[in-house]
Amino acid sequence: MAPHKKIRILLLTNRDSDNLGDQVIEACDISLLEAAMENLGCTRDQYKIVSRAAGVVFRKYLDNSDLKGRERARKLIANADIVVFGGAPLFNFQYQIFAERTALTVRVAEEFATPVLFSAIGIEGYDEENPKCIELRDALALDCVKAISTRDDFEALECYTRGLSIPIAKVADPAVFSEQVFAPFLASGRTDKIGIFVMRSNAFTDNGIDFDRAAATKLWTDLAHNLDAQGIDYEFITSGHFGDEAFMDYLIRNHGIPASKCVFAMNTPEKLAEAISSYRAIVSCRLHPSIIAYSLGVPSLGIIWNDKVRHFYESTNQTDRLIDPGTEAAAKIARRLSDESLSPLAKDETYLASVYDFLFRQIKAILAPDENIEPYPLANLCDILVPYAGTTKEEHEEKLRRKMRRAYGKYNELFDRQAEMQPKKRTTLLDQLRNATARFRRNGQASE
C-alpha cells in the first residue's frame, strides 16, 4: 500500500459526460463505496474517495509511444491504494475510445502494483479480431486487475477474461439506488404526465440499426400525434446530452413539435431524478432514465438502440416493455401507455444487492482479506446510503462549460468536414456569383 495515513480510493467514471446518467452513476458509486468502507469498520477520517473522469489519459495521448500522455494518470494512481472503474461503458470500442483509454490506464496501475476493480461497467460486445479488443484483453490479464463485474453483456466479459482466474459477475447498475441517493431531490408527488426521452438522431445507425434521422423523426412525431389523439399528457425531454437536445430542437423547428412540450437545460443529475420521479411513466432510448425509473417505481418503456437496453430489461423481468424501433413503434408505445397494466414492478432484491455485494467482497479481499465480515443486507444498506449533496454553483458552471465546448467542437468538426467534402461546390457557387455580378454589370452598361 502507498505510504499515507488514509486509504485512498480512486474512482474513475464517465462523470465529465453531459449525459446525466453517467453523473448519476458517479453519485451512486460514491455512496456505495462509502457504505463499503463503513461495512469494513472504517470511519470517515480513515479513507478518502477521489473521483475523477475515466479519461485520465487524454485523447491526443492515446498513442502508446507517447509516455508524456500518461503523467496525469501516473500522478493520480501513484497516490491511490485501489482504483475502481465504476459503471461507465469502459470497454466500448466500436465508435468510442473508452477501450483504448481503459487499457492504458490499467497499464499505468500495473506500474505501481495498484489493485484495479471494475464495478458494473458497460460492455458492448467482443471482437477477437479487433485490435482495440485485443489490447484491452491483454491489459485485463495484468496482475493488478483483481475483479470485474458488468451490468450487461456477461458473455462478452467471459471472452475478455478467458483463461484468467479473477472473479467476474453480472450485477445491477449502481443507479438502481437512485431512490436512496437522490432522495432529497425527488418530486413530492406524481403528475399524470409521460416523460419521453429523445435521443440523438444518429444513435441507431451508429449501433448498426437501420433507423436514420427521418425514421427517428417519424417515430417521435407519430407518437406525439397518437398521444394527442388519446388525450394523454406528455412532454419531450432529454437526459442532458447536447446531441439529444439538438435533435429535440430540430423536431421543434422543422416538424411542428410545440416548444411548450419540450424540456431543455437538463444539466444536473438531481434535476434528472426529480423529473423522472414526477412522471406517471417514461419512454426512453437512453438506458439510465429507465434504470432510474425502475429505482423510483416509475414504469418505463425502453426503445432498443443498443443491446445494453435489452440486457437491463431482461435482468429486471421487463422484456414485455421493450420496444423495437420500426413503423409500428409509435402506435405500440401509445397503446402501452394507455394500458392500465403498465404499473410499477416489484423490485428483485437479489438483483438490487448484487452490485454492492460484489463490490464489497472485492474491496474486502484487498483491504481486509483475513476479516470475517459479510456485506450489509439490502435493507441495512438502503438505510445507510449517504444521499447526494447536490451540484454546487461552481460544479454547475463547469458542467455547462464542458457541454458547450463539446457542442462547439462538433460544430467545428461538421464545418471542417463540409469544407473538405465540398470544395468544388463552393468554388462553383463562387464562380456563379462572380458570373452573375459580371452579367449585372454588363446589362447595366448596355442599358446606359
Image: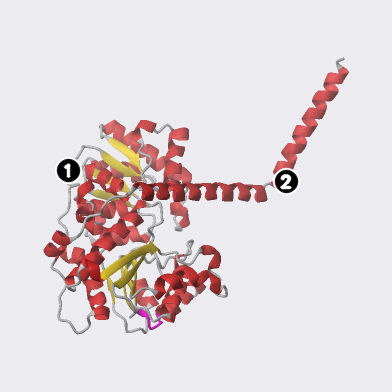
For the C terminus, which image quadrant? top right
The residue under label 1 is which amino acid type? Answer: Glu
Viewport quadrant of the N terminus: bottom left
Along the horizontal axis of the image, is 190 left or right of 428?
Answer: left
Q: Which residue is mark 1?
A: 340
- Mark drawn on residue 424: 2
Give the class, few, some or many, for how many residues have Cα within 10 Å of label 2's Cα (few <14, many ≥20).
few
Earlier residue among tags 2 and 1: 1
> Which residue corresponds to the image point at 35% horizontal and 48% vertical from the top-left?
239
Residue 356 visible in rendering: no
Main secondary structure type of the part rendered in magenta: loop
Tag 1: Cα neighbours inside 10 Å, few (<14), some, or many (≥20)? few
Q: Residue at x 47, y 56 (%)?
A: 206
Instruction: Tell me: 102 left or right of 28.
Output: right
- Name the spot of residue 69 as percent of width and height, x first: 53, 69
For the question of whether residue 75 can be seen, the reply is yes
Q: Between residues 30 and 122, which one lies in front from this camera angle? A: 30
> What segment carries the magenta color?
141-145
Decide: marks 2, 1 in contact (CB < 8 A)?
no
Task: Give the answer, above or below, for where 422 lies relative to 119.
Answer: above
Q: Compared with residue 144, is residue 439 higher up or lower down, i.e. above or below?
A: above
Mark pair 2, 1: CA separation: 59 Å
